[in-house]
Image (cartoon, grey):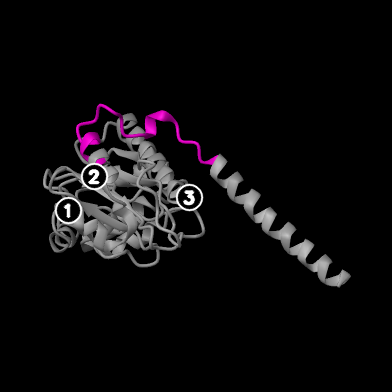
Amino acid sequence: MQALGFYFSKVSIFFLILLFHHFDLEAKENPPSSYYLSDTHPIKPTLDALFSTSRVLLNEKSMKKAGFIISKPRPFTNLIIASHPAMPGYIFKLYLDAQRLHKHKPELHFWMMRIQGALAVRDTIETFQLQDLVKVPQKWLYQLPIKPKGKKGYIRRQYILVEEDMDLVSSEDNERLWRSEYVTPDLLNAIYIILSKAGLRDCTKPDNLPFSWDGRVSFIDTQSHGGKVPFKRLESWLSPLNQLYWSKLTAP
């Protein structure tokens, strides 16, 4: 019995450590006020009204009932991208209460990374005066209302990410553009500068570097930043002439 009591003491200590670790993780996630969608933003009242009425993020059914048009969960991350006809010009990235935590981290962790990555891209664009060639969406945190409460047995999400809609061409048209001579040396130079300065590891493929209808390339995936960039990955998506240029441009 004494040994059993010792065992339960060790188990209790283990779970206490996990609990304190959880609170410590939450404590580190302290977004500056500039990260939040402001109270004066035109879509803030609509979001407040929608998310105060019901537990919209409970599952896919509740999202559709609230009027959202949602994508299938992305492979690996299970991220969902949504839009709403009452809020044209914006998209929403989110996780559902019914989903498991990605990498055992709250969604706020990933939203902050995406905002920070977008800020790094925007700063580079402005520093090198690349606004005519590329762009990056504004991104904000929207903190969900306290009520209604979450459902027992589900993970109550606290934030969604609000982004400007970049008015992208279709996936098929995007790939055609990337293989065409529409991609100029000046555009490749701009992309190389931003990838290098911001360290955008996942922006070396057309899916994450789509063309917008205004002719510019949009940096839409800014979560993985500050790392080593696999430049060669983009090469296969380019025309033969641009492949040669990109290879020389990115050579060590």
- As drawn, 243 above or below 49: below
Determine which quarter of the picture holds residue 196. top left
Residue at numbered disc 1: 67
Q: Does the magenta stretch include residue 141?
A: no
Q: Mark 3 points at which residue?
A: 227
Find the residue positioned furthest to the top: 40
> What kind of secondary structure does the magenta stretch mostly adopt?
loop
Task: Estimate the spatial distance between the alpha carbons at disc 3 and disc 1, rounded to whole Å.
Answer: 38 Å
Callout 3: 10 Å neighbours few (<14), some, many (20+)? some
Q: Residue at the spot x=36%, y=34% of the render?
A: 36
Between disc 2 and disc 3, whose residue precedes? Answer: 2
Q: In which quarter of the image is the N terminus?
A: bottom right
Tell me, yes or no, whether the two marked residues, 2 and 3, touch with CB atoms within 8 Å.
no
SS state under label 2: helix
Quick one: 222 or 85, which is closer to the camera? 85
User: x, y (%) of residue 51?
Assistant: 28, 45
Q: Position of residue 90 (x, y in %)?
A: 20, 44
